[in-house]
């Protein structure tokens, strides 16, 4: 026997309403522009769309010359880090509806790295600092299988394994903006990941590198980096732990 619920007609789901959003994008083409300039675009969006979707619509439907980086579009690759309304974010993780759509949305390239075109910066200075801290396991033993590690030892550096090298933290740092030699938060985070790894044998080497005048002591603990991290890494805490390891001489 059919139930009353089964006999009741299904409720119609209302159509998702579109709305128009204005994006003001900082443009720059080195082949024809002496200085960057702002250009506005009106885009029809839905509440489920993200800033990356808006940039795609601009590039595909309005101006094919708009240049930006993106790959996975799911917050994993870190390619589409940019400044959105003055804050470093991943465009693919920033929902349009979470912004104030009654006002224009400002989008520009991250700061502190050489601007190449529109929203694209030269990432080589960032990766140069990353490589300098030797972000890889250094161990002399050659186990027949895996290197055994306790749950507690693994937990010591779990947070800093989440880094996706998007540069959002480093390019949000005022010290990095003004000092082209500072390693920056991301490099220190990736050094932390191996300094506190019980299987690694080069912690002191990395601590010596970061004890340089452009290392951890340049950090002013403004917490910009922690706020900017799209993976929720406690960047400032990691930097503080590296400082403490330098002072005590051990991880």
Image: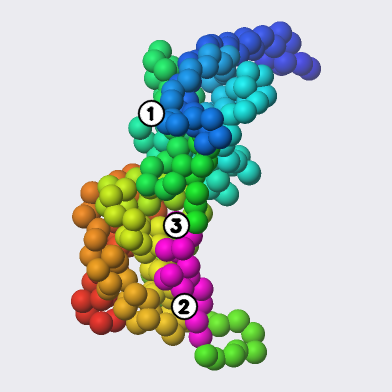
Please, what secondary structure does the residue beneath circle 1 have?
loop
Q: Which residue is mark 3?
A: 125
Task: Give 177 or 99, whichever is nearer the viewer.
Answer: 177
- Which tag, 2 or 1, sits closer to the chain's start? 1
Query: Are there few (<14), some (14-19), or many (20+) residues within 10 Å of tag 3?
Result: some
Q: Position of residue 182 (x, y in %)?
A: 32, 60
Res 217 seen here: yes
- Please determine whether, in this image, residue 46 is positioned above or below residue 66: above
- Pinpoint residue 100: horizontal percent, then vertical percent: 39, 19
- The residue lying at 38 percent from left, 28 percent from top is 85
Q: Is residue 122 above or below residue 193?
A: above
Q: Which residue is mark 2?
A: 150
Q: Residue at x 51, y 73 (%)?
A: 136
Looking at the rendering, the stretch of residues picked out in magenta corresponds to 125-139
Quadrant location of residue 84? top left
Residue shown at 44%/85% (left/top)?
201
Q: CA distance from mark 2 to mark 1?
A: 43 Å
- In the rendered image, residue 17, in percent from the top left (x then y), is placed at 58, 11
Q: Give the x, y percent position of residue 209.
A: 34, 75
Q: Is residue 93 above or below residue 213?
A: above
Mark 1 = which residue?
A: 85
Residue under the point 62% across and 22% down: 63
Q: Nearer the viewer, residue 230 or 220?
A: 220
C-alpha span from label 1 to label 3: 25 Å
Helix or strand or loop: what does disc 2 sit on?
Answer: loop
Q: Choose between 125 and 246: the one closer to the eye.
A: 125
* Number of marks in the rendered image: 3
Of marks 2 and 1, the one in the foreground? 1
- Examine the structure image and report whether residue 185 is included in the region drawn in magenta: no
Whether residue 241 is visible here, answered yes or no, is no
Mark nearest the camera among 3 and 2 is 3
């Amino acid at each position: 026997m059919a139930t009353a619920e089964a006999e009741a007609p299904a409720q119609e789901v209302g159509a998702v309403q579109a709305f128009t959003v204005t994006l003001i994008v900082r443009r720059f083409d080195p082949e024809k522009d002496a200085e960057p300039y702002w250009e506005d675009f009106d885009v029809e969006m839905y509440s489920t769309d993200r800033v990356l979707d808006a940039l795609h619509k601009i590039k595909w439907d309005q101006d094919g010359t708009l240049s930006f980086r993106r790959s996975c579009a799911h917050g994993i690759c870190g390619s589409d880090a940019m400044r959105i309304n003055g804050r470093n974010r991943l465009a693919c993780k920033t929902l349009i509806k979470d912004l104030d759509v009654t006002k224009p949305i400002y989008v520009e390239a991250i700061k502190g790295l050489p601007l190449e075109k529109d929203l694209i910066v030269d990432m080589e200075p960032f990766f140069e600092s990353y490589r300098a801290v030797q972000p890889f396991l250094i161990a002399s033993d050659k186990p027949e299988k895996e290197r055994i590690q306790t749950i507690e030892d693994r937990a010591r550096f779990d947070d800093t394994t989440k880094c996706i090298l998007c540069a959002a933290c480093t390019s949000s740092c005022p010290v990095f903006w003004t000092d082209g030699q500072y390693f920056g938060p991301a490099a220190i985070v990736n050094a932390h990941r191996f300094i506190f790894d019980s299987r690694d044998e080069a912690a002191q080497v990395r601590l010596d590198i970061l004890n340089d005048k452009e290392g951890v002591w340049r950090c002013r603990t403004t917490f910009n980096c922690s706020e900017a991290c799209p993976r929720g890494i406690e960047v400032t805490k990691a930097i503080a732990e590296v400082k403490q390891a330098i002072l005590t001489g051990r991880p």
